[in-house]
């Protein structure tokens, strides 16, 4: 049933430590689905989706209040960049020049999620979008030449569009003034059950990927592209997460769950195609992830240890959520056999990911 309340609004939600106002874009479609996005890092604060009986509930993990969001150093539910995931060796070489990146772990040399004060910590400039069958917000940020060691001034826009089909689409666009590397994603943690507490063990996952990239002891891809056949990473047919997360496979034990890049079976390079499907049998909710990216890092919140409180008021613990980080492969700048993440002046980086919601009560 359509709802006349479809709208997009911007409201202040608090004052950051530097004195600037953080705003929240509230998007509501004609079906009553709601998405709230912060201008601090583009964090998805809330996403209300219906169950099989039409009851709305928040299906993303959140933080207790504004201060908790501001104090979070991790890219929780946020835009990740300039380079999502890991770059090893303290940096990368491009055009015969080595770029040393800020924030490398002194023990491992790994730079995670773009380094300190990455895109998830930046305050983005919002513009509301209104169309006949969709509402949205466009966020804009210019990353200066040399920020965190990355070359080139990177002009970035990320648009969140809530469509009437209960689809949240995220469009990324970037240009650069110098040759650089770019890998952008969103790091939202989903949990489809109601109430929104407890592990995702009972949810079932399907991933359209015949291969994955195994990791070394520091969770950096080794460069191998391995078949999922006869491994716990074979989600080509839907499988209950509990049955895979307790596997004794060395890769599962290494990451304490799933924290791996899946090489998607694409119909063509850059095609917007189905990557993963998550199903909760209790609520009947189904999340379908579609992307133009060649990979998706699936992460089952393995580091959650109860030290952070969620919007539910309960402590967040291991496997309380699952993230679908649609992206190019981790450490691609240092792996020649991985798809390139190089962006040059005059080129435009474009990427699209859709999170579509339906239920098992709807016709397939």
Image (cartoon, rainbow, N blue to C red):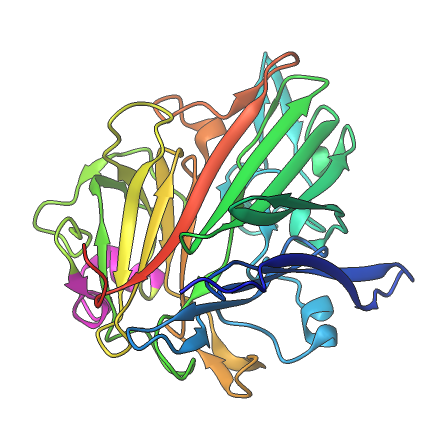
Position above or below: 284 against 218? below
Q: Of all residues shown, which one is farthest toward the bottom?
A: 313
Q: Of all residues shown, which one is farthest toward the left?
A: 230
Q: How many marks?
A: 0
Give the camera-side residue of 332 and 322.
Answer: 322
List x then y, in percent, for residue 109.
Answer: 56, 44
Position above or below: 202 against 26? below
Residue 121 in magenta? no
Residue 40 appears in view: yes
List x then y, in percent, for residue 51.
Answer: 33, 73
For the point 25% across and 70% down, which residue is it?
203
For the point 52% across and 44% down, which residue is it?
170
Left or right of residue 155, residue 304 in this image: left
For the point 69% across and 44% down, which residue is it?
139
List x then y, in percent, for residue 39.
Answer: 72, 55
Left or right of residue 324, residue 9 in this image: right
For the point 59% across and 64% down, which residue is it?
5
Q: Quadrant of the N terminus?
A: bottom left
What's the magenta bit mostly, secondary-structure-wise? helix
Residue 81 appears in view: no
List x then y, in percent, for residue 355.
Answer: 41, 52
Residue range corresponding to the magenta coloring: 239-255
Residue 252 in magenta? yes
Give the camera-side residue of 36 and 320.
Answer: 36
Q: Quadrant of the C terminus?
A: bottom left
Give the camera-side residue of 173 and 18.
Answer: 173
Position above or below: 334 against 254? above
């Amino acid at each position: 049933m359509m709802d006349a309340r479809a709208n997009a609004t911007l409201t202040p939600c608090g004052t950051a430590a530097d004195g600037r106002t953080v705003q929240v874009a509230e998007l509501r479609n004609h079906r009553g689905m709601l998405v709230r996005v912060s201008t601090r890092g583009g964090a998805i604060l809330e996403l209300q989706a219906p169950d099989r009986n039409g009851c709305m509930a928040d299906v993303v993990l959140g933080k207790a209040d504004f201060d908790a969001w501001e104090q979070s150093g991790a890219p929780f539910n946020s835009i990740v960049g300039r380079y999502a995931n890991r770059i090893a060796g303290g940096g990368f070489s491009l055009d015969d020049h080595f770029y040393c990146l800020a924030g490398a772990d002194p023990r491992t040399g790994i730079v995670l999620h773009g380094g300190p004060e990455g895109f998830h910590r930046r305050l983005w400039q919002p513009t509301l979008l209104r169309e006949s069958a969709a509402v949205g917000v466009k966020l804009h940020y210019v990353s200066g030449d040399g920020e965190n060691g990355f070359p080139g001034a990177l002009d970035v826009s990320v648009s969140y569009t809530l469509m009437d089909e209960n689809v949240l689409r995220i469009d990324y666009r970037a240009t650069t003034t110098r040759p650089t590397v770019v890998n952008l994603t969103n790091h939202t943690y989903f949990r489809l059950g109601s109430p929104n507490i407890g592990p995702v063990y009972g949810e079932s996952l399907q991933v359209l990927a015949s291969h994955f990239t195994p990791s070394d002891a520091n969770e950096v891809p080794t460069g191998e592209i391995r078949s999922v056949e006869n491994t716990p990473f074979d989600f080509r047919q839907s499988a209950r997460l509990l049955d895979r997360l307790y596997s004794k496979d060395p890769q599962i034990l290494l990451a304490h769950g799933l924290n791996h890049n899946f090489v998607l079976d694409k119909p063509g390079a850059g095609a917007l195609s189905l990557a993963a499907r998550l199903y909760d049998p209790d609520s009947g909710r189904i999340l379908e992830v579609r992307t133009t990216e060649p990979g998706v890092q699936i992460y089952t919140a393995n580091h959650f240890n109860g030290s952070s409180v969620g919007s539910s008021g309960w402590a967040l613990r291991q496997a309380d959520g699952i993230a679908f980080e649609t992206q190019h492969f981790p450490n691609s700048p240092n792996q020649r056999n991985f798809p390139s993440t190089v962006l040059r002046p005059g080129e435009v980086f474009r990427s699209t990911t859709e999170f579509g919601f339906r239920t098992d009560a709807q016709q397939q």
